[in-house]
Structure formats: structure tokens, C-alpha cells
Image (cartoon, coloured by chain):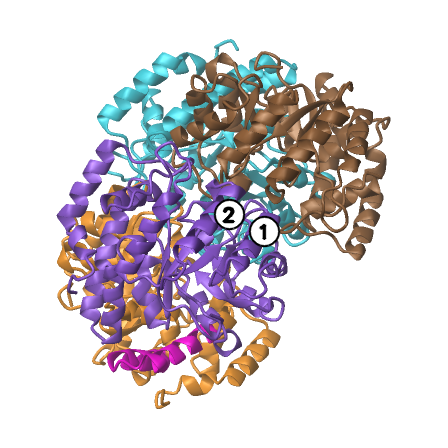
Chain colours: A brown, B cyan, C orange, D purple
Amino acid sequence: MSAKTPLTGLVAATHTPFHADGSLNLSVVEKQASQLLIDGVSYAFIGGTTGESSSLTLVERRLLCAQWMEVVKGSALKVIVHVGANCLADAAALASQAEDLGAAAISALSPSYFKPRNVAALVESMAEIASAAPDLPFYYYEIPTMTGLSVAPSEFLAQAASRIPNLAGIKFTSSNLMEYQLCTAVNEGAFDIPFGFDEMLLAALAFGAKGAVGSTYNFAAPIYLRIMAAFERGDFAAARREQLRTVRFIQRLASVGYMGAAKAVMAMRGVEVGPPRLPNTALSAAEIDSLRVDLESMGFFDWIKPDASA
Amino acid sequence: MSAKTPLTGLVAATHTPFHADGSLNLSVVEKQASQLLIDGVSYAFIGGTTGESSSLTLVERRLLCAQWMEVVKGSALKVIVHVGANCLADAAALASQAEDLGAAAISALSPSYFKPRNVAALVESMAEIASAAPDLPFYYYEIPTMTGLSVAPSEFLAQAASRIPNLAGIKFTSSNLMEYQLCTAVNEGAFDIPFGFDEMLLAALAFGAKGAVGSTYNFAAPIYLRIMAAFERGDFAAARREQLRTVRFIQRLASVGYMGAAKAVMAMRGVEVGPPRLPNTALSAAEIDSLRVDLESMGFFDWIKPDASA
Amino acid sequence: MSAKTPLTGLVAATHTPFHADGSLNLSVVEKQASQLLIDGVSYAFIGGTTGESSSLTLVERRLLCAQWMEVVKGSALKVIVHVGANCLADAAALASQAEDLGAAAISALSPSYFKPRNVAALVESMAEIASAAPDLPFYYYEIPTMTGLSVAPSEFLAQAASRIPNLAGIKFTSSNLMEYQLCTAVNEGAFDIPFGFDEMLLAALAFGAKGAVGSTYNFAAPIYLRIMAAFERGDFAAARREQLRTVRFIQRLASVGYMGAAKAVMAMRGVEVGPPRLPNTALSAAEIDSLRVDLESMGFFDWIKPDASA
Amino acid sequence: MSAKTPLTGLVAATHTPFHADGSLNLSVVEKQASQLLIDGVSYAFIGGTTGESSSLTLVERRLLCAQWMEVVKGSALKVIVHVGANCLADAAALASQAEDLGAAAISALSPSYFKPRNVAALVESMAEIASAAPDLPFYYYEIPTMTGLSVAPSEFLAQAASRIPNLAGIKFTSSNLMEYQLCTAVNEGAFDIPFGFDEMLLAALAFGAKGAVGSTYNFAAPIYLRIMAAFERGDFAAARREQLRTVRFIQRLASVGYMGAAKAVMAMRGVEVGPPRLPNTALSAAEIDSLRVDLESMGFFDWIKPDASA
């Protein structure tokens, strides 16, 4: 994989599995991986926002990476390791491990407690990480709703192009589709810009997105594959109908705290990724029951069947 | 026109023409209208954000409306009157005038110095305006980057449906395409949701938008008509190429203050709408020259020719 | 009054009185004025944020000003007229009226639907207003929580000093006390900076504030006069105790929507200023009862007695 | 030290010293400590925002703590260890070390990549940290400009009071002085609320602050001690004059990036704490020269002399 061979299809931003007491439960990774393959997902993006990487120790992030690389050995599933951290030395160490273990790519968000003052500071920060895995494609991870960063990603790309030799593109989790277009156009389309807002995937397809990285691809990938197929055949009525379904269930999950709700849905599907860690919070038993009822009532569990027709 | 007959095609959010000294120059309206017809625009949206309505006196807003209604008499161009204001009594007076003069519809944004505390307060505020023109379709104008409002437009629509009999839909100027989808789905698609971010039009088309209200349709409508045509025939490569052109020139205009730059572009095209009023600022002569050179260099003046091929 | 003779003591930002149906009820102004005199307030600031000026028509603002000027004729109460508006022509017209009728000073906030792009645009906007009342002291009104403006007021002051001959200072309603200090220091203290956050008055006194403009001075002035007196005699225990009282009741009012609650408190005191206009909302009868009970329970109605001891 | 024995005087939020290549340079800690003692500072707050803790590895944070505890052994300087981190397990480990090594107190900010959804989630997050050092006073660190958190600190305090036995108070770095007052009043003044905005110290003194934690106390403590002394003797003219000096130099430092500028000032004073780590950036040689000239010109190097008169 390189900037010349973009990510295609769905990239699931995977959960980090915990025991009920919050300790790491790596035995679940195998189940996560097999479910993704069943659902038609192409890549596992590990240790990202959905993976609660900011709530993991460095040791845990290393163990998680090692486990995933072991599990996917010989399978069709490829692994992209998110290595970003407030501490760039930690991020670089994780990048180096990812390269050693044969990951397909790495990605990193910007430090966000301290925010880079300008584009140059962001480029230098990312260069420090990317240079620790020089043979892997590097994806900058834009997600301003979480980081609070205001650097235009297209300006990052333009300046980083000559500074970061292994720069592959941007994991673009933002609703700023003007910036999305600018990113796809930098250096005449040299960079790969997988899209990160699941509930707006159809918009990104219209703008040429080939791949999508998201959290709900862990448990609802079939819906999105149908969106992609409908887009390909020009069936916008079907594409909109499916995309609206995702809007409905995402709105429901978000109403009780997305992270806890999403992990509860994983359990409903038989993949016991456990509760989130603080400061994220788990749903109460009553909230889980209510969520299940509502999801059933809207048809969610049918929608996410791989063989469901659009 | 009603909620049953949605706005289709391009709705130009027109500039209010001023003399060099800032006084109203209504003689230009005729030229504006004829240019829109030449460019294939279906509606003139007058006195909105682009129309600097917040910088006009109530008397001037009345005169502007009267002039437009007079000018379009007998022409194919329809007029939608923006009547929103911090003072709801002013807005209601403008709504009443619009109905009296036979406008096609009215629209209003929320008061934004004081912001409604919740959905109910917004609904009541809009009801006060809409009820002053009970026979005209009413469009709520969502534009959170200007108003700072955080009320979800889909919740407004759901609650206003039974409170505002003449509610037709929402002029949706926001990049929140999750909300856009929710709005299109309220009451099984009962409402018309024309889209308001010119530079993301293609995304809205993918989500089913039939009409678009925007500022750059005053001088660059042909590009957007080509986007719509390309979308219709499934030619996304062409649609993206055209949309990227709009991103390029909008970015350039915004770099020196959008309002002053857009009015300068109007003058370059021979429609002398004059400078903006304070607090918006006009471009200096040097800035205008530089803007013209850059626009020429990117091909802008060819792009906006009605007969240009995609 | 000029920059050389700063505002001293309390300036009440008065409510605009309405009938129950929302129409202007100017007969109440006399009662408002007499109550302020009883409470030891030095100035009435009319048509500001508390006065809901953005919800008034221009005609109503003129009537309000005329009524106040008539009522205070021959009394010790001086009137400062807030004239700010999104439309600078409206603001200038109000400024001119204020000068004609003999107001003590005028004040204006920045247009906020369109926000000045930089300090220069703000200065020009304010100059347009101030020049319409050249013989009156002009106070720029800084209140970023309402306007969303990010221009540093100290930079405004520095640039406006030579551009606006009648610039007297700033009505400073912001918690940025670093900026407050910078404002007091511009041109070696040439400008008057009355403070606008009632609940932090003690902090401003520490930084040298001589006057304070605020909404709760309409009904709780005695508390603040005791704060000022305690500060003067160095009794910080007393000053803090009184200031904490204001924090308590302001927090309670804000919990149900400050504007509606404050107008309800006025009625409790016998000054029937009526409900606010939309988009602000009135308290329900139940909310008013509950508010009265809570205020009684905390001692509010004793605190606000002019003769209460600290 | 406990909630019953509040922090008094100045608490310097110390820099973490690096070599020119960015590696930890613990040999400088001794110099830092001795300079603080010379300057009349009572406590060193280590590994906080100024200490760039988010840019340090866990191992480095442990080494930094061990070094400080070793250095201050037998001296009058007490150490407060900031242990906050996005990963609560890391924070708890640091808390435990701080207790083992005999620190005076610990403090922690909230995770900020993920933000607690409500007060309860924040309380639980802080409880997880505080319980790892049950015999040390625990200070919650409020700094919304960095964390983006919107939980009211007074509500945190009210709910945490019964949940966190060793809760001592809040390091309050916010300009919301209404909240400051509410915090000081929780449980009838049971908690200690040292103030964290150096440039507004005088305001906090007026509200009863006994201690202050800040970054500029590393190199400009004498100015602040004079502010405290002037406040004590009721000399507000002197207090304001000194406080304005701090506003002047802080504004100058911030203009080129505070962290890099502050570390440059430390070097000017002979305490070679080195450059900051990315994403913070060091000043260029030219920027340092210009900064020195400007500081000299305003009198900074005289102001910070311990023996300077007010």
C-alpha cells in the first residue's frame, strides 16, 4: 500500500476490548477480526478514537498492536495502526513497532492538549512520528471535533508533501467538504483521503472517496457496503434510504453517549468488547435494554445482516 | 409554490445594490434580474445574508422588495423575500409586504443577538413571522455559522410542523449533512430543504436536494447548472471538476473578505452593485486588480460563461 | 461628562417595559426612574441588552428615548442611550436623537450578524455612529458573549483614540480582566472603562473601576453599593459576602432564562415592566412562584433593601 | 497539608528542563529549585501544563518527580505533583509514586481528548486518580481554555466532596470569577481554591485567594509578591501598577508562543531549561534577541529583582 494504492472499501476503527473490570481483554481480538471479515470489511484501524487509545497505557497499546498483527497473520484483513498521542515520543515508538510487525500503514492525530500554533508546527510534529516508520504509508488523522485544531488539512498536506516522504494522505473526519475537495486536489490528486464520518459517507462518495474509516463499520458494515454498491450503480434512492438508516441508529447511540452505546451494540452482536474506560462511561443495564428495544424496533438488526437486500 | 412544489434549480441570494457612497441604488435591480435570467437562475432570494439585510433600514428593505417585485413583473424570475430580523415586528411587517406584493415565498433566520433558549422559543419566534404572511410558503433559514444557534433544524421542523401552517421547509446553510438527512425525512419528506453551501452542492444533490440557494449563483450560475446536469447523467468526474472550480474561486474571494470580493466580481461582470456597507468592507483598488488577475489566471471568467462546456 | 469625567457609581441597564401583549408600555418608565433614584443609582442606561433593543423597532427605540428624557427632566438621574444596531444608519439616527434630547452619553455595541473582520472595520463602524452625536461622550460596548466578536477591546481603543474625537471609553462586559487592565492603560489612562459583569464587580474595583453598568442594578443596587462601600473601607470580608449574594441570585435567575426571570423580579418589586419579547421568553406562573420562594428563602428581599446593613 | 491548611503564597508551575536535542535534562532541576527559593516561592508544581507533561513519556514523568523529590529534600520548598493524563491508569501510577516519595499534594486535570459527559463522569475519573494517593491532598485542576471542558467546577466540588476523601480543592485557572466565588463557598468554605491566572491575581486576592499557582512565578515571582503585599496593606495603586507590568510582559511572551518564550526567559535568567518539545516550538535566535530587547526596554529585568521596590 502507498499513496499510489489508496485504501478502498471499509476500514473499521476497532474497539479495544476490556474485561468488565476495565483490564485489557486481548482474547476478543480474534472474534473482532473474524466478524469484520464476515461483514466484508477490508481493514482494521486499531487504537484510534474508537479504540480509546488515549485511555490506554503505552504498554497496552503495544500489546494491542502485537495481538492484532498475530491474529490477522495469513488472513485477508489488513491492519492500520493509529499511533498518535500527545507525547510524540510515545507515538514514534508505536510507529516503529507497527513497522516492525508488518502493519499496512500508520496514522496519527495531532497532539491536542497543546495544539500546534501553525501549519509548520503540525508538519514537524507529524514528521517526527512518520519518520519512525519510514517504510509505512502515513496518514494524518484530521478530526477537529475531538482535537479542537483549526489548521486547514489541505494546507497541512501541501506543506507536508515535501517534508514527509511516506505521507500517504489523510483520514478525514470532518464535515468540511470544501476542505475535503481541496485535499483531494493537492499535488494533482497525489494523496489518498479516506473519509471518516460514517453518517455522511454518500457525500464523500460523490466527491470521489474510495475508502472510509469509521466506527460503525464494526457492527453495521453491510449497510455501508450497500450504500457503496447503490452509489456505483447510480441508485441514489437506495443509497439515501440506507444512509438515513445509519443516521437513525447513530443518533440513537449518541443520545446515551456514543462510546458506551457502541460497545453495548458489539455485545448484542456477540462480540464482547466490554465497557469503555473512564472518562467514557458504560450504559446501565436499563439503558442497554432500552437501546436494544429501540434498535429492534427500527429494524437495525435486520439492516446489519450481510445478506440483507437494500 | 408550497411544500408540495419544492424550489428547483438555482436560487440566487442577491446583493443589495448601493451607490459608491453607500446609499441604496435600486436602478441596478433590473440589471441583476436580467443577468440571473440569462444565467439560468430560477429565483431571486432578496434581502438575505448576501443582501446585507442586517445593514439595511426597514424602509430600505421595503423599497428593495417593492423594486424587485416591480422588476420581475411578467418575467420568469420568481422572488423569495428574506424577512428575518432581530426584531420580530420588523420581520412580520416585511412578511406582510411580501405577501401583499405577490412574492413566491418568504424566509427568515432566527434572531441571533438574543438566541432562542430552546426549540419551542425558536418555533414561536418563527410562527410570529410566518403568520404575517399566511398565504405564502415559509422557509426557516438555518445558518449556524452566522447566527451561532445550536437548535437542531430537524427538531425545529418536527415541532413547527403543526404550529406553522404555511411552513414549507428550510433554507439549509450548514455542513451538517446528518441534520440535512434528518430534515428531509421529517413527516415522510413533507418539507422542502434547499441547500445553501454552494461549494458543497454536489453532496446535497447526492442527498436528494432539488434546489439550492446561494450567493455565488449571482455570478457563477452556469458552473452549478453544469454540476446539476453532470449529477443527473451520473458523470461524477465532470461534477467534481466543476465543483472544485467553485471551491477555488470561493477560497480566493474569502481570502480578502467574501462580501467585498463578491460585490467586486459583480462589477467585473458589469453589474454594478457597489461596495458593501460597514461592518463589511470594500476591497481596495489594488485588491480588486489582484483578484481579477487571479480569477483570470484560474479560468474563472471562462467557467462562468453560460455556454461553457463542462 | 467626558472621558475626563468618568461615570461613577452604578449605571442601571434598564428594562424596556411592555404590556402583557408585548406592546410598548412607556407609562412604566417614571416608576423605573423613581425606583433607581430611591436605590441610589446614578445613571439609566437605556435600550441596551437588558432593554431588549434588538427586539424593538426603530420607532419604539425613539419613543423609549424620548420618554426617558422627558421623565428625568429636572431629576438627578442621568441617561445614557444605547444606540447600537446591526444597521449602522439606524444606530446613527438614534445617536443624533440622543444628542438632540440632551442625553449624558451614548454607547453602541458592534454589529454582530456581520462581524467586523478586524480592528479597523470595527473602528470605522463605531466612527459612523459616534460622529452622529459629536458632542456626546461615546462608549463602545464590549460584550463578546453576546456578539461573538474577537477584536481585543484594548486594540480598538488604541486605534479609535485618534479616529473618534468623542470617544469616552468602553462599557466593558467581559471576564477578560487582562484586557480590562490594558484598556485602563491605553494613552495613560485617558479612557473611562465602566465594568459590566455585576457578579464580578469586586474584581473590577480592585482594578480601579469607578463605575459599573449592569442589569441587576435595576433591582438590587443596594447590595452593590454596599460592595463599593466595603471595598472603599478595605472590608473585604463584607465585600465578598455581599458579592456572593449576587452570585447566588444571578445563578438562580439564569437557571430559568435570565431575561424573563429578571423582568419577573421587577414585577415582584412593584415595577411592572411586563414580559420580555421573543425570542426571549417569559416565566410561567409556576416558575415565578418557585422563583419568589427561592429568593425569599435565600434572603434576597432583605438584601436589596436600601437600608440593609452589610 | 490538607484542605484545612491551604496553599499560601506562590506556587510555581515549573518547566521541564530539556537538552537542546529535546531529551530530559534533570541536572537543571537543582538550579530551578534554588532560584525559586531565592525568589520567595513556596511550592513547586511539577509536570503540569508549563511542565509540558502531555509531551513527556510516563517514564520521564516518573524520573522528573523522583529528581524533584531528591532535590528538595531538606529544603523549604514543597512539591506538588501534577499527575493528570488522558490515560487514568498513568495518572494513578504517578499519584502513587508521588505519595511514596512524600510529595506535599497531587493535582490532576481532566482527560481532554475524551471529555467527561457530565459532572458524575468527571468525579469518577478524578476519584480513580485520587484514590491512588489516599494520604495526599488532591487538587482538581480546572483549565477550560486547554481542556475545552464545560463542567462547572463548583458542581464538581459539590459532588466530589463526599466521593473523594482526600479532595483538598481546585487549582483554578479560569477567568470565570463567578465560578471562583461559588467554589470558595462550597461546604461553607471547606475547600482551598488557589488561583491560576497570573495576570489576574489581584482579582483573585479580592475574592479571598490565599495561594496562586502559575507559570510566570518561575521567573517573575517578586512582582507577584509585591502585588500580594500591596493588597495586604490596601495600596491598590501599587498593586495595579505591578499587575499591569505582568500583563505587559505576558502579552509580549504570548505574541511569539508563550511556552517557547517563557523557556527563553528562563535561559535569560541563567536557568537553562532548554527549548520546548513539539508541538510547542522554540523561538528562533532572532526572536529571542528581539524579546530580550523588548523586555529590557519595558524594565522587565528590573521588575523581577527580589529587592525591587514596588
| Residue A221 locus on image (x, y percent) | 76, 29
| Residue B137 locus on image (x, y percent) | 59, 42
- Which stretch appears magenta? C221-250
Q: Is residue B222 visible?
A: no
Residue kind at label 1, given as amino acid type: Ala
Residue for point 39% across, 76% down:
C243
Q: Indicate whether residue C227 is drawn in magenta.
A: yes
Instruction: Depth check: give the residue in front, D3 or A175.
Output: D3
* Residue identifier under label 2: D62
As drawn, the label of residue A162 is none
Q: Chain of mark 2?
A: D
Residue kind at label 2, given as amino acid type: Arg
Q: In the picture shown, does residue A260 fall above or below C192?
A: above
Left or right of D158? Residue A28 is right
Instruction: Depth check: give the residue in front, B42 or D56.
Output: D56
* Residue identifier under label 1: D93
